[in-house]
Amino acid sequence: MNLTYGYKRELSLAIIKDKVRILAKTDILLVVEFHIRQDGDIKYAFVLLAAVVICMLLVGNYAYNGRISQNSTTQGPKPTAGDASKAEPFPHKIWQSWKDDSENPTERTVGFPHQWRVVNPGWRYERITDANNDAYVLDRFDTNISDIFTSLKDPILKADFLRYLILLREGGVWADIDVYPHQPISKWIPKQYQGSVNLVVGIENDHHKKPIWPGSPYSVQLCQYSVLAKPNHPAIRTVVNQVAGDLKNLFASKKPGDAVSFEEVMSTTGPFAFTKVLMDYFKEMTGTEHTGDELDSLPEPRLIGDVLVLPKDSFGWLPHENTHEKGDSSILVEHLFIGSWRNSHQG
């Protein structure tokens, strides 16, 4: 091989054999062996210089990459939508909303807000009321969102939209006022999934591979009365954008004074809408269609992308179904389904 240097002297190296062995744990051990037979006049200094340059390049590569890869051209997997927030912990905040900030909002929920604080010491409890929800949204969202929110007259549409906005902006736990905590939030995510989860949802209804509602492509309904999220989760962002668009369409279809039906609530801001967005997100994360059939009689939490789906009895346990005794550790929260809004929404 011919090498030409600055002083224009041609050097012919008959054999160059070099071995570089690198062992790296906490320190780097470089052992460089050169066996060189020369034809002609070769200065040892150039051989030494070459060895030093090789060592410097290798050490520099180690420092830059954290390790010396056997195949430095191999690329890792593309980041998923939730990767950006995986390193951040879930905010230790518990969010609820109600007409006012009374300690016992209804006769059937006496002690519920207090119990959230008792079971989760160190978590901040926040209550958004009818008196300050407009101000909260106006202060934190642009007019594309705030104009829609502040124009809402239907209280259930407004309450539904508010939960998604809070989860998107703040993260933490959302719990409806009639949700009772049985286990600390710290027990919601099993150890093997900690560090991989950015959103936790539960199953409200499981129709065992049959449509959850007439004409629905889904056989399970995910609940939105209790959700744990990190701020700015892409699925929650999609929910917010979807709800905003659907509310505009709903308003456009109504005449002044027209009532909003039960089905319109469920499909515009309620669990029908929430379930659809999550199923679409599961498909985006996995590349396969999700209908809920894969969650039929789910026996344990399942991670889909960065979303942890809990079994039905975790969030959707009902005493009359006789699946678990009250007090069973698998029951994380209990929803009373007070649902007073249903009486004012026919359908």
Image (cartoon, helix red, strand yellow):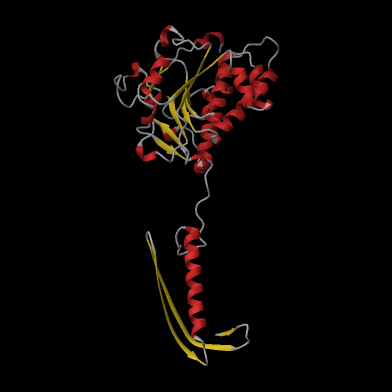
Seen from this angle, which residue lies furthest top? Answer: 107
Q: In front: 91, or 56?
A: 56
Residue 239 in view of the camera: yes
Q: How many marks?
A: 0
- Quadrant containing the N terminus is bottom right
Q: Quadrant of residue 181?
A: top left
Q: Position of residue 241 (x, y in %)?
A: 62, 30
Q: In front: 28, or 231?
A: 28
Seen from this angle, which residue lies furthest front? Answer: 45
Q: In front: 192, or 17?
A: 17
- Quadrant containing the C terminus is top right
Q: Is residue 312 left or right of residue 245?
A: left
Seen from this angle, which residue lies furthest bottom? Answer: 40
Q: Is the residue 302 above or below the residue 178 in the image?
A: below
Q: Report the residue at 38% width, 30% height from top.
A: 186
Q: Is the residue 19 above or below the residue 188 in the image?
A: below
Q: Report the residue at 35% width, 33% height from top.
A: 300
Q: Position of residue 306 (x, y in %)?
A: 47, 39
Q: Is the residue 279 above or below the residue 331 in the image?
A: below
Q: Position of residue 276 (x, y in %)?
A: 54, 30
Q: Quadrant of residue 185?
A: top left
Q: Report the residue at 34% width, 19% height from top.
A: 321
Q: Position of residue 283 (x, y in %)?
A: 52, 39
Q: Is residue 155 left or right of residue 316?
A: right
Residue 297 in view of the camera: no
